[in-house]
Image (tube, rainbow, N blue to C red):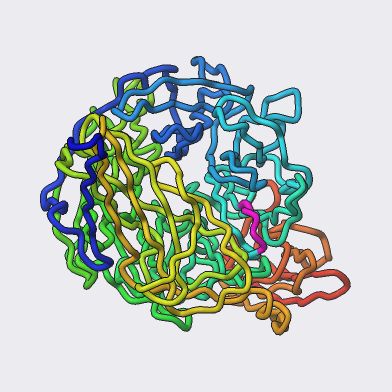
Amino acid sequence: MKGGLMKKFVVVFGALLLINTVIFSLNYIESSAGLQTPQLESGRTELEMADINQDGHIDILSIGDHGSPYINTQEHGIMVWFGDGQGNWNVFQNGNFGYGGIAVGDINNDGHLDVGYGMHHNYSSDDFGDSILEAALGDGTGQNWTPWDDGISTGGDWGMFSTDFADVNNDGYLDIGSVSFGADDGIHIFLNNGDGTWRQCFGFLGGNSTMHFNFGDVNSDGNADFCVAHQYGSIYLGDGEGNFVLADGNLPPAGNLGRLGTSLGDVDNDGDMDFAFTNTNGGIEVWTWQGNNTWANFSGNLPTAGPYYLTQLYDMNIDGYIDVIAFGDSTITLWLGNGAGSWTQDVTFYTPGPGSAEAFRVGGDADHNGYPDIALVSEEGSGWNPINHLRFYKETSVPESLFVFPVFPRGRERFEAGSVLFIDWTCGVPPGRIANMRLEYSTTGLNGPWLMITPNTPNNGRYQWRIPEGIASESCYIRYTAMSSYNRDTAVSIAVTRAPFKISPITSIKEARVVQPVKPNLSITPTISPRNIEIKISTFGLKKTELKVYDNQGKLIKNLFKTWGNGEFCINWDKTDQNRRSVPAGNYFIVLEGGDKRLVGKVVIVN
């Protein structure tokens, strides 16, 4: 190089196209070296992929399956399998608890990633792991954790499971939500006060759960909603204040266990989150949000029956359209979407049998080839004594040049100024190179000016951004700049959000907003029945609301349901008492109580 000058290669990708990087047939290879330690046991668990120590490489986190802590295994506490950027792993464990779900995010805004977790085995003798739902601060190493969860108390004692973070009330702090382990302990949402204390804004006890919970903005109003695999419903819309209303609309019936294998993603690129799940025949269903509590079947040619139990919605081939990937009975299948409801089966591969699906997560890029990878837990081995295996599958393509692809925001979403936004991307880096990222935003369109989000952050696929207050724009974009140096050469790749998104000034909205309480309501169908009773309720505002069954003598028969905050729910009474014994024929009274108010309905049980 003449004059000792650094040679620079600049590769620019536009907002709408990713040139010469999209491959049309994906291929995966197992990359599980190090994941055999510790040996797992059995039962469900939850995985997260995140760069917990901020070294630029994706790690895998879990609190384990039924074997944690120390039940026929060496599993215990928060388990982090640190990735090396090539698809190899090394585990570190801390804590005396386990068997549950986990979420990752920076809950105190100090720049270090923290964790929230729901569990069944809260066996610890100290504050770290003695409750069924907790949060703990990380120190940037992924090895040390400090409890930070005063005020998190669900009122149940059986256990919580799948857990997620989102800024529910748009105040710049991540809040926590979780669903119960199996039956009884319901769903709970807690708001983060930013000082290590939390307050419950929504939740209830009761009902069956198949242990999936995810936040996302279903109706694109800038407020966090959630989807959940629970008997009482799947989709709950948030109002930005911590209240939620059921919005299952015309979705097919959920059954006694709720819809299975739930996930969220924007499959039609309209800016809101759509809904995928598996049906009782093991088939795949995708439904798009239409507004006004209405859904449209977007399943197209997806299989109506099959071996599948868990789903994920993600752009696996980075073409700008969300794809569907499903796992069940040893089978992993990917269907590529086109944004219009047509799905093309691209790849199927298998785990060893019997292959019961115990955990499933996609999205992290372990080897920096620019394509999302797959982590799962599969129960394998003898039918008499199968055990769980954690497996990782990485996409095999090798990038010839540096590229970056925006994952989220995708465009057309709405966010609130002052709230937390997860910015996601994927970046392909040629072998032997290391890349870092610069992130900028514009509120005035593609021509800028561009304002700095971060000048230099690891290429790990995610950055947690607190949107500045006072922004009001419908023409916002994020610019992603990947920078990679090797010897004296530098490569740069630039990409921009595919379509504009909106940012609204949350301060002025909150000042003007008048929160309308939900009008209390109690509806019972049928009122004379030999079958189960369906009860639809609207709660008493911010007060605690309880639903109880009494007999004709005024004796309490069963506590059916308990919740905090505004909401609408559908509860089924199976005609059993508190001890799960069938009640005799006769007159019963369904009572909805909140504070000093109550609504009463009568039902006649006939045999």
Looking at the magenta stretch, what is its main secondary structure? Answer: loop
Estimate the x, y position of residue 292 in percent, counting from the top left: 47, 83
Q: Residue at x 56, y 69 (%)?
A: 223
Estimate the x, y position of residue 141 in percent, counting from the top left: 55, 27
Q: Is 99 left, or right, of 516 in this rendering?
A: left
Estimate the x, y position of residue 85 in percent, counting from the top left: 33, 30
Q: Residue at x 35, y 46 (%)?
A: 363
Q: Residue at x 67, y 58 (%)?
A: 204
Estimate the x, y position of residue 268 in percent, counting from the top left: 30, 71
Q: Image quadrant for the C terminus? A: bottom right
Residue 358 found in image quarter = top left
Q: Is residue 410 magenta?
A: no
Front residue of 339 and 280 = 339
Find the magenta span and give its range: 171-176
Q: Residue at x 22, y 70 (%)?
A: 341
Q: Is residue 172 magenta?
A: yes
